[in-house]
Image: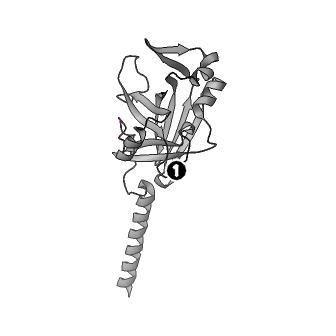
Amino acid sequence: MKAALKTVAFVGAFAGLIAGLFLAFGPAGAVAPAAPDLPLRVSPWLEQAMDSKTCPLVDVRVDAAGQAGRAANAPSARVATVWLAREDDAADPSAWPALYLSLGGRPLALRREGAATDVEAQSLRDRRGPALRWSAPAERVSARLLLQAPRLYVETGEGWRPVSPGRAAQARQGEDPTRTVWKGRLSLDLRGRRWEREVEVVSICGP
């Protein structure tokens, strides 16, 4: 009888340990990553979907080494991209509905929190950067993007021409391709581990 009770107690303790590890390391049982993949690894579905060139195409970039500061001529790497969520094709891409990261080689989509507004149009109109949040609760991963005021560029025969802030919102409505650039900071909560870097966000909209 005593041996049976000891066996039951051991099994119960072992089950509790397994449950604790599951909660600590997430649904997939993987150790919490220290950082997102650099560069971003895109799933075949997302690569094909974004090839449609639907406006806008938004990338979040850091320097290739993942450091906070980088020289103007230093190479950069894409750490995240913004697109539609796979299960919600009816969403408006201008609302930046999903933020895509990759962790340990596995692509992950985070859904935007808050009101679905046209991020770029509002930012250009208000002449200030937005504060945006996305999350994937089942994966215990969340992201916060805090941006400064944007700069808009219009493509001409000689390259990208900067547009004054007072004319930016109107220029974006024209027929010429535009490129909007924000500086800011991306903060990630990766299953309890924090990762934060200065980033450059670039949104390209073509004809």
Q: Main secondary structure of the magenta part?
A: loop
Q: Nearer the viewer, residue 90 or 119?
A: 90
Residue drawn at 50 percent across, 33 percent down = 56
Residue stretch in magenta: 36-43
Q: Is residue 128 visible?
A: no
Q: Nearer the viewer, residue 11 or 200?
A: 200
Few, some or many residues within 10 Å of mark 1 (<14, 14–19, 20+): few
Q: Amino acid at mark 1?
A: Asp
Q: Is residue 124 visible?
A: yes
Taking the view exactly as shown, the residue that stands out farthest to the bottom is: 1
Percent position of residue 28, x then y: 39, 57
Percent position of residue 12, x then y: 42, 73
Residue drawn at 55 percent across, 48 percent down = 90
Residue 185 is a magenta residue:
no
Q: Nearer the viewer, residue 122 or 200?
A: 122
Taking the view exactly as shown, the residue that stands out farthest to the right is: 126
Residue drawn at 52 percent across, 25 percent down = 182
Q: Secondary structure at mark 1?
A: loop
